[in-house]
Image (cartoon, rainbow, N blue to C red):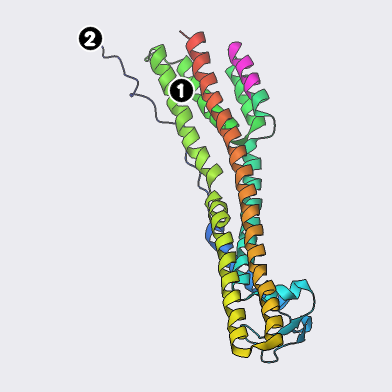
């Protein structure tokens, strides 16, 4: 009976293993930031010593009057202010978290230079030296390249598959390693993209509430004193707009910075896969 030649799907189990990564920060950080936003607003901006006529009753939302300085003036922007402060803190937390994660994923050296070194070693059929370069480089590109090189080395001694099937096997290994790396890079960016849109709307919402409150006083009191109260109320309401726009602008900037860096890493990963498949196809026909 003739021996059946294995197909490209009959391949050894992948050496790529899913990495267990906890994402506790994605739910605990927003809660802590909301609490922190209220504490800053209530006990920092709303400290009794920062007003000429503080509310002795205190409570959840004291009715302090006569802020001393702009910092305490923001307190009178209303209950939307702590929500905006919380949004700002969330942007800072996840900007730092993504910065650390993406910096680690970038690796220890230039990815283009790393790929050139791997290409040089592969051209000289020195796979072990290429693997050593991966250990030095680390990062997402290094991890994907290392997974592909292990399969590359395995396929060199494989006598059951033809060249085309071996190339497909290497390509699948690279794809599986890539599928494990990319989610880690893009994780938590949704917070930045969401706040970039929502913060401005929250700021406008706070401004509208402040304007309603100011015009209500104008209608109740009337006269020159009411006009002065209206002017002050409008100024206080606009603090919400300023906080919302500033937070949204920061979120947009950080989101674009991180997506640009991720695109660069993704390009390096794609180039790694192309390097491995083309090298094997040309050297081990």
Neighbor class of circle 1 (other Cα within 10 Å; few <14, some 14-19, many 20+) is many
Nearer to us in this view, 152 or 224: 224
Neighbor class of circle 2 (other Cα within 10 Å; few <14, some 14-19, many 20+) is few
Residue 238, percent from left and from top = 66, 68
> Which of the labelled discs sits on residue 153, or is there none?
none
Specify start and end residues of the magenta stretch as a single range. 115-124
Farthest bottom residue?
Answer: 57
Give the residue at mark 1.
170
Residue 24, percent from left and from top = 54, 58
Report the residue at 65% width, 53% height from top. Answer: 250
In this rendering, the label closer to the viewer, 2 or 1:
1
Res. 162 image quadrant: top left
Report the residue at 41% width, 21% height from top. Answer: 168
User: Helix or strand or loop: what does disc 2 sit on?
Assistant: loop
Q: Main secondary structure of the magenta part?
A: helix
Q: Earlier in the sequence, mark 2 or mark 1?
A: 2
Farthest front residue?
Answer: 223
Residue 69, percent from left and from top = 79, 75
Q: Residue 11: within the magenta?
A: no
Q: Do the residues under discs 2 and 1 have CB atoms within 8 angstroms?
A: no
Nearer to us in this view, 258 or 232: 232
Give the residue at mark 2.
2
Residue 208, percent from left and from top = 57, 71
Q: Residue 117: within the magenta?
A: yes
* Distance from the alpha carbon under mark 2 to that under mark 1: 28 Å
Image quarter of the C terminus: top left
Res. 135 image quadrant: top right
Report the residue at 46% width, 23% height from top. Answer: 170
Report the residue at 57% width, 63% height from top. Answer: 30
Position of residue 134 in the picture relative to residue 73 (left or right): left
**183 versus 206 height, above or below:** above
Farthest left residue?
Answer: 1
């Amino acid at each position: 009976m003739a021996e059946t030649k294995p197909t490209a799907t009959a391949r050894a189990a992948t050496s790529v293993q899913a990495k267990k990564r906890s994402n506790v920060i994605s739910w605990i950080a927003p809660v802590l930031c909301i609490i922190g936003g209220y504490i800053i607003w209530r006990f920092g901006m709303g400290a009794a010593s920062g007003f000429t006529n503080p509310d002795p009753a205190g409570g959840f939302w004291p009715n302090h009057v006569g802020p001393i300085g702009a910092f305490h003036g923001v307190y009178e922007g209303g209950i939307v202010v702590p929500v905006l402060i919380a949004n700002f803190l969330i942007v800072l937390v996840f900007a730092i978290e993504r910065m650390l994660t993406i910096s680690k994923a970038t690796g220890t050296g230039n990815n283009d230079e790393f790929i050139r070194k791997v290409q040089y070693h592969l051209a000289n059929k020195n796979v072990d030296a290429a693997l050593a370069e991966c250990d030095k480089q680390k990062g997402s590109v290094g991890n994907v390249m290392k997974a592909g090189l292990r399969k590359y080395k395995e396929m060199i001694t494989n006598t059951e598959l033809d060249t085309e099937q071996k190339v497909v096997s290497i390509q699948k290994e690279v794809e599986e390693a890539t599928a494990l790396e990319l989610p880690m890079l893009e994780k938590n960016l949704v917070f930045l993209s969401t706040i970039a849109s929502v913060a401005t709307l929250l700021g406008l919402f706070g401004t509208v509430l402040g304007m309603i409150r100011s015009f209500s006083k104008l209608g109740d009191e009337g006269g020159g004193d009411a006009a002065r109260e209206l002017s002050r109320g409008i100024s206080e309401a606009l603090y919400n707009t300023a906080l919302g726009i500033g937070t949204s602008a920061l979120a947009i900037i950080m989101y674009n910075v991180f997506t640009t860096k991720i695109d660069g890493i993704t390009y390096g990963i794609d180039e790694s896969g192309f390097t491995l498949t083309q090298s094997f196809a040309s050297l081990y026909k």
